[in-house]
Image (spheres, rainbow, N blue to C red):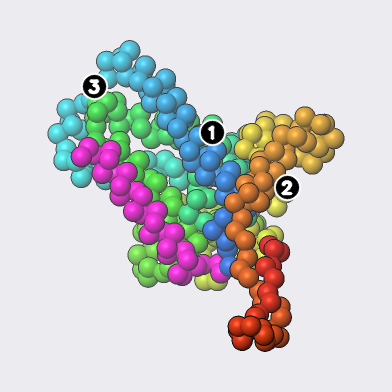
Amino acid sequence: MTLVEKTTIILFAWIAFIVTWERISPYRKGLPFFREGFWVDFVWYTLIQSYFLKILIFDYIIAPVQVHYHLNGIKFFQSWTLTEQVLFFVFTHDLYIYLFHRFQHANKILWRTHEAHHSVKQVDFLAGSRSHAMEIIINQTIEFAPIIILLGPNSPVVPIKAMLDAMFGMFIHANVNVKIGKLKYFFNTPELHLWHHANYREVFHANFSTKFSVWDYLFGTVYDPGRKPGDNRENWGLYYDYPKDYFLQHAFSIKRFDEKSLLKYKWFKYYYELRPNLIAGLKKLFRLKKGATIINMHPQDDADTNETIISYKINKSV
């Protein structure tokens, strides 16, 4: 079994664990599994965008640079143990992510590459996948290029770190009620990061950490009021209207527009309603019938058989 296969199995097991945890001990009770935006996040961001951006970043950005300059690793870093290499790149990249994340919240242009991530109103394990394509290109190029340059193109650190990124990303966004005591001063948790996704002025410039909350404590950007943001829709996400469609979310980062005002165009109305109508049609096609409901319990004696007959009607309502 290859390392990629092992990390994939671990990742799927982690997903099952997190999903179960969300059902057993939710941070916000009552959030549905198929919440608003679930299919956009799963299909477009997690599956399609991740697949194509992986090819773009590794095959068309990092690889050409590595081949052109003959960057096959540096012996000093290659001499380290695998554990030392993983810890080094996890820790240094996490510091970069903290600083870049903080800059995104302070810069109007970079905010447009990050606002999609904050548009989720019902934050769960999958919400972390919603990130603008340009944000992914910047962050993952800066993340994996140094690994390949310093350790070589076939370093096992790449799949291991990619797995840890995904696991931590799902954990800090997960709708789970968990406290880790004093460890929260070093490791990030949903308790802190879910506040970062709340629609409050106090947290717009707070809780930027991804894996290690120590950065927020060290640089004075932590916000931990000891309570939850609330369960109302306005307590979460952005304070302004944001498109729900994947392509419109990217277009919105370039040019602001009112999503609903575009419905006056027939072609846009058809496109905009295509996915909801398709989902509604599939639900109607595969919807199970309700069970039989007894509406008449009056026994009637049959003269020939002495059997009791019960009248009933199938309830076809759904």
Classify mark 2: helix, strand or loop. loop
> Which amino acid is tagged 3?
Asn
Identify residue for label 2: 241
The percent position of residue 45, horizontal first and vertical second, equals 53, 39
Asked which secondary structure carries label 1, the reply is helix
Q: Earlier in the sequence, mark 3 or mark 2?
A: 3
Left or right: 175 as drawn, with respect to 83: right
Residue occupying image coordinates x 57% and y 55%: 34
Foreground residue, 202 or 134?
Answer: 134
**Helix, strand or loop for the magenta stretch, by majority:** helix
**Real-space Cα distance between discs 1 and 3?**
28 Å
**Looking at the image, is 216 positioned above or below residue 146?**
below
Give the camera-side residue of 239 and 4. 4
Amino acid at dot 1: Ala
Outermost residue to the top: 68
The secondary structure type at the circle numbered 3 is loop
Residue flagged by tag 2: what amino acid is it?
Answer: Asp
Q: Which residue is mark 1?
A: 133
Residue segment shown in magenta: 1-29
Tell me which label, 1 or 3, sits earlier in the chain: 3
Residue 253: name its quadrant. top right
Query: Residue sitting at 18 percent across and 32 percent down?
Result: 78
Would residue 13 be seen by someone viewing this image from the given angle? yes
Mark 3 sits on what residue?
Answer: 72
- Would residue 120 appear left or right of 168 to someone viewing this image? right
> Do labels 3 and 2 touch, CB within 8 Å?
no
Which residue sits at x=58%, y=67%? 30
Quadrant housing residue 122:
bottom right
Residue at image point 69% right, 67% down: 315
Q: CA distance from mark 3 to mark 2?
A: 47 Å
